Image (cartoon, rainbow, N blue to C red):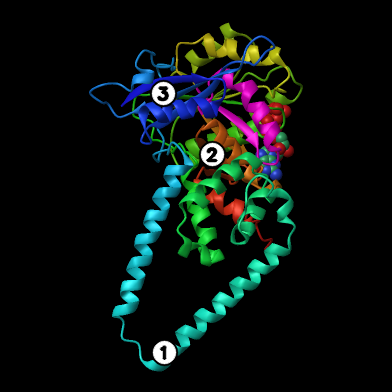
Amino acid sequence: MKLYTFTAPTPAEALRKAQAACGEEALVISTKEIRKKSLTHDALYEVVVAHKEAATPPPAAAAKSPAPQRSTKKVDFDDEILLNISKTAEELSRIQLSKAAAVTDKGEKGEADGSDEEFKLLKRDIADLTDKIKLLQTMLWEEKKYANDIQIPPEFAEIYKIAKESGMDEKHIKAILEETLAHMPLHMRKSSQTIRRYFQVLLKKLIPVRLEREIPKGEQKIMMLVGPTGVGKTTTLAKLAARNALLEHRYKVGIITLDTYRIGAVEQLFQYAQMMKLPFEDVIDTQDFKKALHNLSYCDLILIDTVGTSQHDTQKLKKIAAFLEHTNQPIDVNLVLSASAKYQDLMDAYEKFSFLNIDTLMITKFDETSGFGNIFSLIYETQKPLSYFSTGQEVPDDLRTASAEFLIECLFEGFPQKVDA
Ligand SMILES: Nc1nc2c(ncn2[C@@H]2O[C@H](COP(=O)(O)OP(=O)(O)OP(=O)(O)O)[C@@H](O)[C@H]2O)c(=O)[nH]1
Ligand SMILES: [Mg+2]
C-alpha cells in the first residue's frame, strides 16, 4: 500500500479527485481541514488515501508526498473501510442478488405437497398485505416536504423517517439514499423488511472501528482522553482502568491526571485509583508530566485524564497540546463525545480538538439518547474509528468495546435500556 494526498476546497471534491486518480479500491486514511475559508481564499481540505502499490503511481497524486502522519502510529482498523457508499451499495446489491437466486433455485427444486404449498402462498400474501399497510401508513407521514430535491419513492419513506428522526445529517441521508436508489435492484424494493436490512448492512459497512489489541509484552501503551466538559472522560477512564487491570486483562495500569486546577477533580479520580490500588500521579506542568511518565515506566498501560475543555477555550486546548509535544513517547489520543449532543455540536467539538491528532472516538451516554444518527454522521464525516462506548454511569460495568453492529442496532431500535429487577 502507498499513501497519496489530494487537496481541494471541499472534502467531497478532494475525495472525488482521490477516486478519479486511485480508483474505487482506494481506502481513505484521513480527511482534514488544512486551511479555513476566508474572504480572500477558499478553504482547503486534504484527503489521504491508501492505494495498492502499482507499477506507476496514480497520475494526479504522483507529485505529492504522503501526508505527515505521526510516525509512531499504526492504522489498525478491524474492517476494510470502503471509500464510498456507491461501491458498498453496489457490492451489497450483488450479494443480495446472488442470495435471491439461491433461494429461487431451492424453491423450484423443493417437493412440497399441495396443502403445504397453499399455506406458504397464504403466508406470503399476508406478509405482502402487512407490508403494503405499513407502506401506506408511512406515506401518510408528510415526507413529501423533505423530498424537494430528491425523489423518495414511498417504499423508502420508512427508512428516510428513521434516519431523519435519528439525527442523521440531511446531506448524508440524501447521499446514501441516492446511491441506494441507483444500485438497489427492483425486486429488493418490494418488501420494507428487505429495504431495512439492506440499509442496516450498508450503514454498518460505513463505520470504522478500532479493535482493542493486546499490548505486546515489554511494550507500553499510553492513552489520553480529551473532550468537552462533562462528557464522561473521568468516568470512562476509571472504567478503562478497571477493564485493563482487573477484569478483561491483568495489565499493570497507571493513572495520570492533568486536571489539577478544579476543586474535587483530582479527588474524583484518586478515589477510583485507590479503590483499584492503582498508582496515581497528578501533574501540573510539562516537567511534572515527564516525571510522572518516568515514575510509571514499569506500567503496561498509562491512562491520562485531562481537563474538560469547551471547544471555544483555545488556551486550555493549547495546554493539552503542550503536554503531548513534551514527550517523545507515542500517545494515543481519544476524543470523548456524548451521544446526546447534536450532530453540529459534535462536529464543532471534533474540529476544535482535531489539531491534537485524534486517534479514536469514544462515545458516552448511550443510555441518555434515543437517536444515534448524529454519531453515524460524525463518523461518516470524520472517518475516525470508534474505540469504546459508555452506556451508563456504573463503574466499571457500563463500558463496551465499540461495534458498528451495536451502533446501527441502536440507530434502528433504540438503546436497549436495562430492565429493573
Ligand atoms: N447516563 C450516563 N452518565 C454518564 C456516562 N458517562 C459519564 N456519565 C456521568 O456524567 C457526569 C460527568 O462525568 P465525568 O466523568 O465527571 O465527566 P468529565 O468529562 O470527566 O467531566 P469534566 O472533567 O468536568 O470535563 C457524571 O455524573 C457521570 O456519572 C454515561 O455513559 N451515561
Ligand atoms: Mg473529568
**Residue 334 located within the stretch drawn in magenta:** yes
Precedes in sequence: disc 3 or disc 2: 3
Image vertical order of residue 72 relative to residue 339, above or below? above
Measure the alpha-carbon separation of dots 1 and 3: 64 Å
90 magenta-colored: no
* Image location (x, y in percent) of residue 56: 26, 21
Residue position for label 1: 116
Compared with 156, 340 (above or below) is: above
What is the magenta range? Answer: 332-359
Task: Work out whether residue 191 can be spotted.
Answer: yes
The answer to whether residue 169 is seen in the rendering is no
**Foreground: disc 1 or disc 2:** 1
* Marks 3 and 2, how far apart at CA: 20 Å
At label 2, the amino acid type is Tyr
56 relative to 299 in the view: left or right: left
Q: Residues within 10 Å of mark 3 (few under 14, many from 20)?
A: some
